[in-house]
Amino acid sequence: MVDKKKDTTTEAKILDAARKVFIAKGMAGARMQDIADEAGINKAMLHYYFRSKDQLFETIFKESVGNLIPRVKALLNADLPLFTKIEMFADNYISMAMQNPYIPMFVMNEVNRQPQAFIKKMFGNDPPDLSKLVEQIEQEVKKKNIVPISPVQLVMNLMSLCVFPFLGKPILSMVIGLDELQFKNIMEQRKKAVPEFIIASIKK
Amino acid sequence: MVDKKKDTTTEAKILDAARKVFIAKGMAGARMQDIADEAGINKAMLHYYFRSKDQLFETIFKESVGNLIPRVKALLNADLPLFTKIEMFADNYISMAMQNPYIPMFVMNEVNRQPQAFIKKMFGNDPPDLSKLVEQIEQEVKKKNIVPISPVQLVMNLMSLCVFPFLGKPILSMVIGLDELQFKNIMEQRKKAVPEFIIASIKK
DNA sequence: GTCTATAACTCGATAGAC
DNA sequence: GTCTATCGAGTTATAGAC
């Protein structure tokens, strides 16, 4: 790695700053001036590199969600036991979110802001298909490996338990009284604790 | 109720409109013009009644969270069995959120925007105290009524399972493919399904 | 109390020098 | 490529007539 350019190119500085500001304040709340200040350059540069606020935002947004989607899709269609899928989803998602703790809120927000635009942008023509997973759950119920549970409820539970702690971090930290390190430790535990919690509930 | 004034007073019309717009678009995304249009009056009136956008927003925000907090506090300190508390929290919260499905996202967002200002505004000098609930959970573990579980993880699980579906509604509707009615039915089921799911996991 | 008109200001975007 | 200066659209807020 001799000739690494650092992240000192103007473009990289802009992207770092934009990521920070957009994620903290959302599209509507962010100011181009904030981003310029954060990057230590001036506003005109932002337009020189990314033409408009919309385009800069979209770059950040795609980068934030783009990484996750292919992995989720792969997992959905994988040929693995149900419990393994649950374990892998929890581990993958929580690991990603620990490295980028503000992404869940950021994404949730923008999806809320314009749900249909989001679908097109992120999934194009082939949205994620849960049918295989749903069928797998129904099979496990039929085989009496797990208790009778609605697949929708089970999927909702898994997502809730993985995603919510990052969305609700400020409230949870406040109500339960956690500092950064404690929060981090608890999330680390959760990679195993969530699948265990779910499996304990549904296993026969 | 002969002389009921309806909600046709200008102030009430403004509040109804502001609630709708702020909740849909957040503080930064909302426009005073949108609120005026929604209320069927003009912008100047908004300032006549509420002086500034900030003040109008704060009125709506306090109203949104204000109802919930006393009920949560009461439940936390109530002298009830653990499983009963879990059942009551799920039922209360999900019922509230079904009537006001955008409040969870709205609140989560604004808490995120300014966490410390939020604490002061909402709780003043006495923030909610979870210590009694935590102790109760530890007791149940010690008495071997439930499996060993960290109180923090259990509380987090309960909140996740109740709150997340409303935050993630657009994503869930998209991914799972739900219309309004289906979503409503699933949330109705969840009032019972969430406590059952939790209790099945932790009961010995 | 309610309205119209407009002031005051914020912010994204561009022009143009270097 | 980078900067300063400024434009112009969009927004909050106010003045003042009715």
Image (tube, coloured by chain):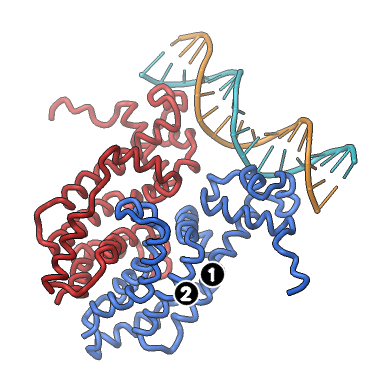
Chain colours: A blue, B red, C cyan, D orange
Q: Nearer the viewer, residue A74 or B200?
A: B200
Q: Nearer the viewer, residue B30 or A33?
A: A33
Which quarter shows the C terminus of chain B?
bottom left
| Image x and y of residue A90, in percent | 40, 74
Q: Is residue B10 above or below residue A68?
A: above
- Label 2 resides on the chain identified as A
Query: Can you tell which quarter of the image residue B185 is in?
Result: bottom left
Q: Are marks 2 and 1 in contact (CB under 8 Å)?
A: yes
- What amino acid is found at the position of numbered circle 2 in the picture? Pro
Q: Residue A5 appears in which quarter of the rendering?
A: bottom right
Residue visible at 73% across and 54% down in the picture: A49
Q: Which residue is mark 1?
A: A123
- Observer able to see residue B143: yes
Residue depicted at 15% across the width and 61% down the height: B136
Say the numbered circle drawn on residue A128: 2
Q: Residues within 10 Å of mark 2 (few under 14, many from 20)?
A: some
In the visual, does B100 lie left or right of B74? right
